[in-house]
Structures are given as C-alpha cells and as structure tokens.
Image (cartoon, grey):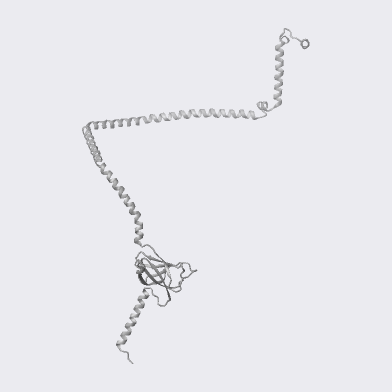
Amino acid sequence: MAISKEVRVGAFAIFAITILYLGFNYLKGVDFLSNTSKYYVIYEDVAGLTKSNPVKISGYTVGRVSNIKLLQNKKNRVLIELDINSDIILGDTALAKLNSDLLGGVSIIVFPGNLDNPIEPGDTLNSRIDPDLTELFKESAQPISDNLQITMRKLNILLDDLSGSGTELKKSLESFTKLSNNLNARIYENRSSLKTTLAEFAKLSKNLNQTVVSLKPTLDNFKTLSDSLANLELNTTLQRVDVLLEQLTLTAQMFQNDSSTIGKLLTDDALYESMGKTMADLDTLLVHINENPKHFFGPLGKSKKQIEKEAKKQ
C-alpha cells in the first residue's frame, strides 16, 4: 500500500516539531534521560529568575527551575519549583540561595547542609537572597556620598571666608603695585648714580683681586717658613725626649741589675747592715770626739792607756 504524499509531509512535520521541542528543552537544561526529584523554595523577590534557570551545587549544574508561581495569599511571595537530579541528597539544613552574576544572569545555588538528616523530595528548602549589584553599589557609595557632602560643606565655608577676605587682598595687591611703581621710579631717577657706584665697585673688586694675586707668593713663602720652623723645633724636641727616655731606661736597668752597686744597695741586706754598723760606729766616734776633744787634738795627744784610765775615772 502506497503512502500518500500528504501523510509523509505530516509525519515529517510532527517529527521535526518533536525534535525542535526536545532540542530546545535540552538547551534549556532539561535532561529527558535522567530522573529528577522536585523540591520547593519560597522567596520574597525572585530578582528576574525565570523557568529553566540552572540550579547549582559548588558551581556544578544539578537541576533547573521547572515552575514559578506567585502566592498572592501569602503577601505576594514567589514559590519556586526545582527539578534536581534524584541522586543528589539534601539535608534538613539545606539552603537555596538566589544569586545574580555580573551579566544579569540569575541562578539558584544550593548548599546541601547536614546529610545525616536527609529530606524527602517535595520538601521546602530554606531560602536566602544575596543583594544584587545595585544594592551593593548603593551600600559602597553611601560612605563616599557622605564624605563628599562633608567636603562640599567645608569648601563652601572656605569660599565664604575667602569672599570676605577678597577686599583686603585687593587692597594689599594695590599697595604692593604702588610700592613697586615707586621703587621703579626711584631706580630710574638714580640710574646714573647707581651705574657709577656699580662701576666703582667693579673697579675696587678688580684691584682687590690683583692685590690678592700679588700677595699669594708671599703668603706661600711665609707658610713654608712657618712649616719649616715648626718642623725644626718639633724634631729637636723629639730628639731630646728620645735621649731622656734612653737615659731613664739605663737607670732603670741599673736599679734592676743585682750585680751593680745600686742594685746591691737595694737588694743586698748584708751590705745594708754593714753600712748601718759603720754609720753607728762613726756616730759613736763623733760623739766621743765632741765630748773629749783633748784626746785627739791636744799638743802631744794621749795614749790608749791614758784614755782608758780617764774613762774609768769618769
């Protein structure tokens, strides 16, 4: 049995529509070959969320938004239906965060929570909405705006102060201009005298330079003579100091040498005792001479026996 042309065209159209539908949903993230579980989450504001927006865990897409419903009987909150792969386990503390990227795309990021107490498909997840870029910009710009307002206020105060000082500043500039004009007039009137004075000063400076140049050899000679005299006196003094140090060294060596007379006198006790005895005898002799001068200085002197005899009588 032959198939008519109309039937073949109709079958091809149905096939093309089916492929188009499946391909479109596949591009939107619908996987017809995987099992999914439905979960729900409620938001105050969906911030542009639409069907087929991705649901991600740690940046990996695990599902999609399958339906969005407005709950007018609950203060216009929005109920979101999520299709999440059935092999994903969510805990009772699971959180669904509504996130907006820089390009305006909106997605839902799921934090599985505590997996020790898993929830069942059909349960509602906890919700959280991150502030969008506009809100973040407002929060960041608010301190800048406040500081800018304070700066503008201070600038206005400064301008007000300057406006009050403008008249005085103008008077000061006028006085300075008048003084400058008077000074220029004085210089113009006395320009001939000033020119003569500058010429005389230049001539005096030239003569002074010539005098310094002529005195330079004399000063050099005087410096050379002074250096020679200083070196001569210094050399003589150093030579005398060297001789004196040498003599002191020899004297110290004599004191330290036991074989020398001075060394023996300082170190030999016998010599010291002998000298002491000699001095004692000499002292006794001097005393005897002082008391009996006739024994030694008489005309004929006296013998030893006479001296001893007179000593016994005393």
Q: Is residue 70 above or below residue 14?
A: above
- In this rendered view, identify the residue nearer to me: 96 or 255: 96
Determine whether, in the image, residue 221 is placed left or right of residue 249: left
Q: Is residue 262 above or below residue 288?
A: below
Question: Residue 313, how many percent across, how many down?
Answer: 78, 10
Question: Residue 130, how many percent across, how many down?
Answer: 38, 63
Determine whether, in the image, residue 256 is placed left or right of residue 16: right
Q: Residue furthest bottom?
A: 1
Q: Residue at x 32, y 83 (%)?
A: 12
The quarter holding residue 225 reads top left
The quarter holding residue 86 reads bottom left
The quarter holding residue 272 reads top right
Q: Residue at x 35, y 31 (%)?
A: 212
- In this rendered view, identify the residue nearer to me: 129 or 273: 129
Q: Residue at x 46, y 29 (%)?
A: 230
Q: Residue furthest front?
A: 73
Q: Is residue 76 above or below residue 227?
A: below
- In this rendered view, identify the residue nearer to me: 283 or 128: 128
- In this rendered view, identify the residue nearer to me: 264 or 14: 14
